[in-house]
Image (cartoon, grey):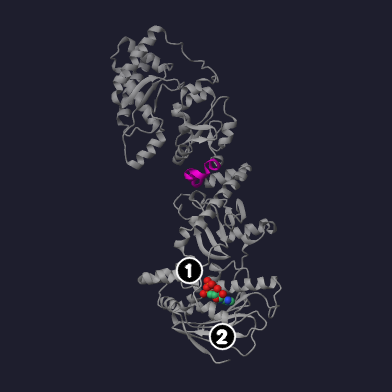
Amino acid sequence: MSQAQQFEFKTEIKQLLDIITHSLYTSREIFLRELVSNASDALDKLRFEQSRSAEIVSPDLDLQISITADEENRQLVITDTGIGMTQDELVENIGTIAHSGSAEFIRQAMADQANSSNIIGRFGVGFYSVFMVADKVTIRTRSFRPEAKGVEWSSDGMGTYSVAELDEDMPRGTTLTVHLKEEGKEFAEPNRIKSIIKKHSNFISFPILVQGEKANTVQALWRENKFSITPEQYTEFYKFLTYDHEEPLDTLHLSVDAPVQFSALAFVPPRSQDTFGFDRDNYGLDLYVRRVLIQSKNKDLIPEYLGFVRGVVDTEDLPLNISRETLQENLLIRKIATTLTKQILTHLKKLGQDKDRYITFWKEHAKRFKLGYSDFANQEAFGELLRFNSSRHEDKDGLISLDEYIEAAKEGQKEIYYISGPSREAVEQNPHLEIFRAKGVEVLYLYEPVDEFVMDSLRKFKEFELKATENADIANLEQFASAADKADKPEDLNTEETKDMDRFLARVQEILGDRITEARISKRLSQSPSCLVSPDGSTSQMHKIMQLVTKDSSIPKKIFEINQDHKLVRNLLSVFAKNEKDEFVATIVEQLYESALLMDGYLADPHKMVSRLNKLMEDSSAWYKEREGK
Ligand code: ADP
């Protein structure tokens, strides 16, 4: 070995080292990721030289990284057969802080000395991070260039380093000998090393041997050509990624060059991982930069409503040492997310052609997916993916798309109608449905609060307006022929009765006072005697949701509609005609109003209603007894 020369580190590196050696950073293991990435880059560069037929030392050497550890001596040796460095390159590369990440790291760490140890994890500080765990590091390297000599660099990370040219022949590549501090001795345990490799460097494309055993076991499938990958390989990768034991429901493999370069491998799991909705925040895609894991479950890569998607994104366009903060506001990440979102939506649309699989998707992931109502940029694509139970179905399990609704819409129909309720049974009892049933117009059944938000923010789908049945303009429905005239429909009111009816409505208004805005004859009812209609076009479901938010418990004022063909109403009208102030009329009107409130979910206190009903039953049982002659 020639005489070793001593050098002093440049100020900036001294600063960096000072921070690193004095930090109490808890994820010190990332030093290994940095060293392995450097080795992998060196191997990539060598492969490039090979591909352009450069003359190379020991051309038959396997391209690999090997790590050996000696626990007793607290020593870790990392060897690669990559491009190596000449003496000049070594001094240049290791002696300067080339990448902006480290410079930025120093700037921030100096500004906030107290927190510098937190900052380390956010910046990959490259080679120097080794001094978090080492008290001495030796680099022996030999460039691939045939004439190059081996060089040795060595430092304790304190203030100086030495460089010497080696006399003896050495193989191409670089060997780092790391002497660990007492506090860093865990990094000489082979199992610890293996698990770090699996966590951070599993997809490095060169074999990483730990004590001679390959530690990176899975291929970075996303970087391969998709035509060369078998479905079994995708499944295997999916299982590796998610720990799921089932096959993915759907797989999306993308390689995009513009507007940003990235590849992505994404899966739709066959089952929701968030059945109860408590874990909604736990989503994201794993971000890799050239096969190195930068962040798992990065939330900026995918919108929350597509959070059921699991997978990885890999880009060449980011530096390895990018910080989390920088990631968050990174334009590139945002562009990837935009492209990816569109691609996933398109992909789901394709999945939609396979009805059975789509139903599985919908049952498992719809809860989360519906949050996509707020993605205004993709509203139409989002709308196309929605599914609903509707009046056309026999039970609550049927599903149709909005497109299917439109296909079956009546000639001249311009609106898509929907109704909300906690269950199919509840919805089908809703008086607002009656005219739709009579006219044979399909109505979508909404069972979840989020559905209201979906309808409210979409407002339109293609040329059709989305309309709650309770807000439907009855004139729009009257153009359609009735499915069948009701056989038990009574005769129309005669002139006298029509006049009585006008006065009766006024009496109803008087009885209910300012609890209603108006009492009027209904055109929408056929089975029920009465219902409430909102005057302002908001739905009662939505209103109730908003009330929960604002902690308001008032009962909204609505229009009270009366079905003049209903037997009960006709009876009441006769009683009223004889005595306008009959108490029985008032009791029944009160009951009808409260029944309507109950149906809409607004009746907070049932006591009055129950005692009124008991009184009515008492009376009717007396009449019944009399009629039956008992
Ligand atoms: P970065 O890898 O982010 O550039 P580092 O401080 O980790 O920063 O490394 C500085 C430079 O040293 C690298 O860019 C590379 O040129 C060189 N280098 C580091 N490790 C190796 C290696 N194992 N083989 C060849 N060159 C290396």
Q: Is residue 372 magenta?
A: yes
SS at circle 2:
strand
Q: Main secondary structure of the magenta part?
A: helix
The residue beneath circle 1 is 101
Q: Is residue 478 visible?
A: yes
SS at circle 1:
helix
| Residue 114 position in % (x across, y down) | 35, 71
Q: Is residue 191 visible?
A: no
For disc 1, does the CB lie below 8 Å from ligand 1?
yes
| Residue 348 position in % (x across, y down) | 59, 46
Q: Is residue 602 left or right of residue 459?
A: left
Closer to us: 629 or 186: 186
The quadrant of the picture occupied by the N terminus is: bottom right
Q: Is residue 372 above or below residue 180?
A: above
Residue 204, image quadrant: bottom right
Residue 413, image quadrant: top right
For disc 2, does the CB lie below 8 Å from ligand 1?
no
Label 2 neighbour load within 10 Å: few <14, some 14-19, many 20+ = many
Bounds of the magenta segment: 367-382
- Alpha-carbon distance for marks 1 and 2? 26 Å
| Residue 594 position in % (x across, y down) | 35, 27
Residue 60, image quadrant: bottom right
Label 1 neighbour load within 10 Å: few <14, some 14-19, many 20+ = many
The quadrant of the picture occupied by the C terminus is: top left
Q: Is residue 601 left or right of residue 135?
A: left
Q: Looking at the image, is mark 1 or mark 2 earlier in the sequence? A: 1
The quarter of the rendering in which ligand 1 is drawn is bottom right
